[in-house]
């Protein structure tokens, strides 16, 4: 066992340790000062909630624990007891959609990365045991990255910008889910309403075809007239099958967005779409509003600003890739230990940082052009959504106030003529076929208005998935277009 005898510390020993103490002060003091400045960012979910309430009037909650999941299941079950409204469907989706909960988990990742960027980097410790002749030497060194310490404020600001961008992106996902849920709800209700109507059409067509068969067998009906009634019935059967498929697909899409399964899929929808509003509100300065609050525009804008800050950081650190300060202690058998310090600097002999600056500048110009493209698209999308909203309302109101009442008056007049034995049953059925296309188109127009309303709301806060105009639900042909004699 090797032992050493303690000896008094002389002035020469103190003078030898002064550089070491200076190195230790230079190493420890910035750590203390920087640790005092490190702070934890505010809660992330609350920030997203403020954004979604301000832009869409909706709130979202994150579920992390099993108790939270059980509470959500109870709330969803309570909401599904009554027939769903559009707003209730949105509430269920924001509570129960697992994809949204996975998106909310990105907030935790961004929070952790910001916290990591706000903390000091860990120091390094190196221990080596070289053997010099018969003596065994032990060398200890502790080093710390001064470059990372000097750049810590810049790195923290960069991560804060990325943190805010993640919050806006998650808020946009929340608003997009709410918009898509509303649209899926209106499509499911309209498809179910059209299905019920086409089922009535098929029953009438079946009765007409049966009556035509009997009259033809009695010799009171021509083969051409009977063939027309049979064609009408066949087409009505096909259109009902198509309407059933459309209704099931629309309902299943709504179920997926609501995150329902098992017995929850037996949800109840209202029999009719909501009534049209009496008047439409004035929507002024839509383009300016969209550019001021659309999250995709703000994300692109702040992304360009963050890239500009990164460009400044790259220019600042083009020559400073490695700057480490360390304290070393070396001891060997039979001799006293020696303590000193070391400074490691990377020499830019071959790479002067031009490639990094060039790449950063290219990223910056890319971000600027992406932001400009996003702003141009936002203006166009909000104009398109507004025109679709106004047009859909005018068309739906025209069907409600003109087309459907006119078709009903014609039907009433023909019914009076039938009761007075002025026309026969087949003339009455022919008039019913003419009404089919009007009623189906009225249901479609009413649905399209509510879809356009959801698209306009989304166009003011984020990129909408604009719904193109579509024809009557459930197909075409004799059952929807009529067949004459």
Image (spheres, rainbow, N blue to C red):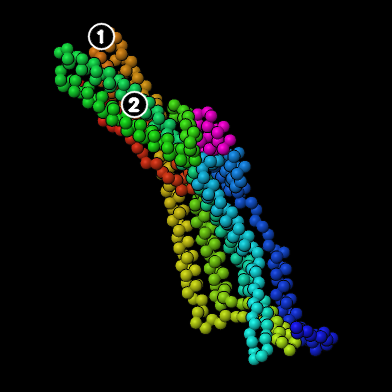
| Whether residue 51 is situated above or below residue 396 in the rendered picture | below
Extreme residue in the bottom direction: 133
Considering the image in quadrants, where does the N terminus appear? bottom right
| Whether residue 29 is situated above or below residue 202 in the rendered picture | below
**Prevailing secondary structure class for the magenta stretch in the rendered image:** helix
Q: Is residue 250 left or right of residue 25?
A: left
**SS assignment at label 1:** loop
The residue depicted at 73 percent of the width and 81 percent of the height is: 20
Pointer 2 local density, CA inside 10 Å: few below 14, some 14–19, many at least 20: many
**SS assignment at label 2:** helix
Q: Position of residue 237 (x, y in %)?
A: 28, 27
The residue depicted at 72 percent of the width and 68 percent of the height is: 33
Q: Nearer the viewer, residue 151 or 301?
A: 151
Q: Can residue 367 be seen in this snapshot?
A: yes
| Whether residue 393 is situated above or below residue 306 in the rendered picture | above
Marker disc for residue 421: 1
Q: Position of residue 131 (x, y in %)?
A: 64, 87
Q: Give the extent of the magenta segment.
A: 73-92
Q: Position of residue 12 (x, y in %)?
A: 80, 89
Determine which quarter of the picture holds residue 324.
bottom right
Select label 1 or label 2 by which is in front: 2
Q: Nearer the viewer, residue 9 or 366?
A: 9
Q: Check disc 2 and report the residue beneath it.
A: 198
Q: Can residue 280 be seen in this snapshot?
A: no
């Amino acid at each position: 066992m090797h032992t050493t005898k303690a000896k008094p510390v002389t002035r020469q020993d103190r003078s030898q340790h002064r550089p070491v103490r200076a190195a230790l002060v230079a190493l420890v003091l910035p750590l203390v000062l920087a640790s005092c400045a490190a702070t934890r960012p505010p809660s992330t979910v609350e920030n997203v909630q403020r954004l979604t309430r301000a832009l869409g009037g909706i709130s979202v909650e994150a579920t992390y624990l099993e108790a939270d999941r059980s509470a959500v299941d109870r709330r969803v079950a309570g909401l599904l007891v009554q027939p769903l409204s559009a707003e209730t469907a949105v509430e269920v989706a924001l509570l129960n959609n697992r994809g949204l909960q996975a998106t909310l988990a990105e907030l935790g990742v961004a929070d952790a990365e910001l916290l990591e960027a706000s903390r000091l980097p860990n120091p390094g410790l190196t221990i080596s045991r070289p053997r010099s002749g018969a003596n065994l030497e032990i060398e200890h060194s502790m080093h710390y990255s001064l470059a990372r310490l000097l750049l810590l404020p810049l790195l923290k600001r960069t991560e804060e910008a990325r943190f805010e961008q993640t919050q806006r992106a998650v808020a946009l996902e929340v608003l997009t889910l709410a918009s898509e849920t509303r649209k899926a709800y209106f499509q499911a209700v309209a498809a179910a309403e059209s299905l019920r109507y086409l089922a009535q059409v098929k029953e009438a067509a079946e009765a007409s075809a049966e009556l035509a068969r009997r009259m033809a067998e009695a010799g009171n009906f021509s083969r051409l007239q009977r063939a027309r009634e049979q064609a009408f019935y066949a087409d009505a059967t096909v259109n009902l099958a198509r309407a059933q498929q459309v209704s099931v697909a629309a309902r299943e899409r709504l179920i997926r967005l609501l995150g329902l399964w098992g017995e929850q899929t037996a949800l109840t929808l209202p029999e009719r779409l909501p009534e049209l509003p009496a008047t439409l509100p004035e929507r002024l300065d839509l383009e300016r509003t969209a550019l001021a609050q659309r999250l995709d525009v703000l994300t692109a804008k702040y992304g360009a600003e963050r890239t500009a800050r990164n460009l400044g950081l790259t220019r600042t650190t083009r020559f400073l890739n490695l700057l480490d300060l360390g304290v070393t202690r070396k001891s060997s058998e039979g001799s006293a230990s020696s303590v000193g310090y070391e400074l490691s600097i990377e020499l830019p002999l071959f790479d002067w940082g031009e490639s990094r600056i060039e790449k950063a500048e290219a990223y910056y110009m890319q971000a600027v052009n992406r932001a400009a493209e996003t702003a141009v698209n936002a203006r166009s999308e909000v104009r398109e959504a507004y025109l679709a909203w106004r047009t859909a309302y005018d068309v739906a109101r025209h069907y409600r106030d003109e087309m459907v009442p006119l078709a009903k008056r014609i039907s009433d007049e023909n019914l009076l003529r039938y009761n007075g034995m002025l026309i026969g049953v087949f003339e009455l059925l022919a008039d019913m076929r003419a009404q089919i296309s009007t009623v189906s188109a009225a249901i479609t127009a009413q649905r399209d208005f509510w879809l356009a309303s959801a698209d306009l709301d989304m166009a003011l806060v984020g990129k909408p998935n604009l719904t193109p105009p579509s024809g009557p639900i459930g197909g075409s042909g004799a059952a929807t277009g009529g067949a004459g004699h």
